[in-house]
Image: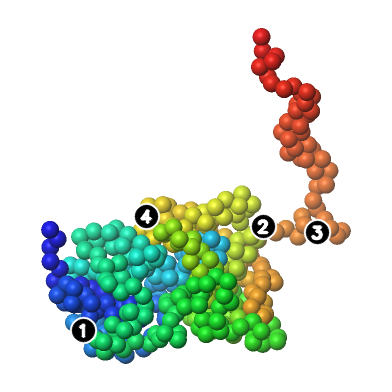
Amino acid sequence: MKKKVKKILLAYSGGLDTSVSIEWLKDKYGAKIYAYSADVGQGANWQSLKEKALNTGAEKVFIDDIQDEFINNFAFKALKANALYEGKYPLATALTRPLIVQKMVEVCERENIDAVAHGCTGKGNDQVRFDVSFRTLAPELEIIAPLREWEFKSREEEMEYAKEKNIPIKVTKESPYSIDSNLWGLSVECGKLEDPWEEPPIDSYQWTNAPENTPDEPYYLTLTFDQGVPIKLNNQHLSPVEIVKNLNSIGSKYGIGRIDMVENRLVGIKSREIYEAPAATILINAHEQLESLTLDRETLHFKKTITDKYAEQTYFGLWYSPLREALDAFVESTQKQVTGIVKMKLYKGHCSVVGRKSPYSLYQYEMATYDENDRFEHKSAPGFIKLWGLPTETYARVNRENKDTLFLKDYVK
């Protein structure tokens, strides 16, 4: 028999699901409900959100500004890895969850809270990220997920419940999107987006201009990296958070970072998501191109396999796993010479690297040029080619000589 919980800390965003959850949890568990919100750059009205949670029945509201920690210790780690789930999604939502859980565990320890709750659905990825992280950092806490338990079968039923209980919500039947945002990107789902044949409605995009509505002249910018970390934008020193915020603003103006994706969720289903990630798109593109200049061929090629695994570990909710930590150690070791400047061109939804330079550049002009400054030893090429192709040549010769042989056993007496 489970011990009766006395205090529940709810991960609270103020959206439909968590707004309804406070009242529902009180009715269901008869416990005191505390609300936790993390400022990861979503631009919320925190005073209004706090008042809403308290008016809805929360005993107390905790709000943490964790933007710096999020960018430095999570987003920029993923940047160094060039992490994109299935080659597209910069993992904005997935990267915040382990940090939010860490902060919630700290609150629980401080306030003697014995249970945590979140507003994740029973078929989404976020439930995995929250649950696994909680069980890793604080296995003694009971985990409650109202959306996996309650009687509502649709968002429309939730809206009706909210109306009955006088819970203020922004979502309407005309605009039923589920939106999650932070400094690293924004995700949108539900509504017409659930039909993968349907073009995303104009109002499904929250940040970025449509490419056809962007300036007719391109915008050029430079990014300066130090050991894989961006430190300057247009030759101006800025904090990590300031760099990301500025790139989100510039990128949105030029329609950068729109992603329309059918992805494979961890729970085994495919979902259609809309993402907007101007800063992440620009930074990952720039970082990849700087690595192409400064990393040797074998490291660069092998790192691509690490990139995919790193993205999977993050997306699958395994941030606190030994493997992710080990991957971080490898990634960090590759960033020692990833220092330099990248020049980029933004135009009509496209983000292109048009220049790159580094004191650690492995590009040697005298080796690459075809003009009179060419210092490459052309006479070495034939011998290299002969040895390089020797295994293939040997295989082909042996099989040509034995093309009439049907079975080896015919020659073994």
The residue that label 1 is drawn on is 57
If you read the primary sequence from the N terminus, does the residue marked by circle 3 or circle 1 appear first? 1
If you read the primary sequence from the N terminus, does the residue marked by circle 3 or circle 2 appear first? 2
Label 3, label 1: how far apart the Cα atoms are: 71 Å
Residue sitting farthest toward the top: 413
Residue sitting farthest toward the right: 372
The residue that label 3 is drawn on is 369
Decide if residue 3 is on the left or right side of residue 247: left
Q: Which mark is residue 362?
A: 2
Residue type (three-letter) at the residue carrying disc 4: Ser
Can you say whether 378 is above or below 195 in the image?
A: above
- Judge depth for marks 3 and 1 and give the one in front: 1
Label 4, label 1: how far apart the Cα atoms are: 36 Å
Can residue 225 be seen by looking at this rendering? no
Q: Which mark is residue 206?
A: none
Quadrant location of residue 220?
bottom right
Residue at 48% over, 63% down: 270
| Residue 377 screen position, x and y as percent | 80, 47
Task: Determine whether the residue tagged by mark 2 lies in a helix, strand or loop.
Answer: loop
Q: Nearer the viewer, residue 34 or 381?
A: 34
Task: Determine whether the residue tagged by mark 3 lies in a helix, strand or loop.
Answer: loop
Quadrant location of residue 156?
bottom left
- Judge depth for marks 4 and 3 and give the one in front: 4
- Judge depth for marks 4 and 1 and give the one in front: 1
Q: Which mark is residue 321?
A: 4
Q: Nearer the viewer, residue 306 or 356?
A: 306
Instruction: Judge the density around disc 1: few (<14), some (14-19), many (≥20) Cα neighbours within 10 Å.
Output: some
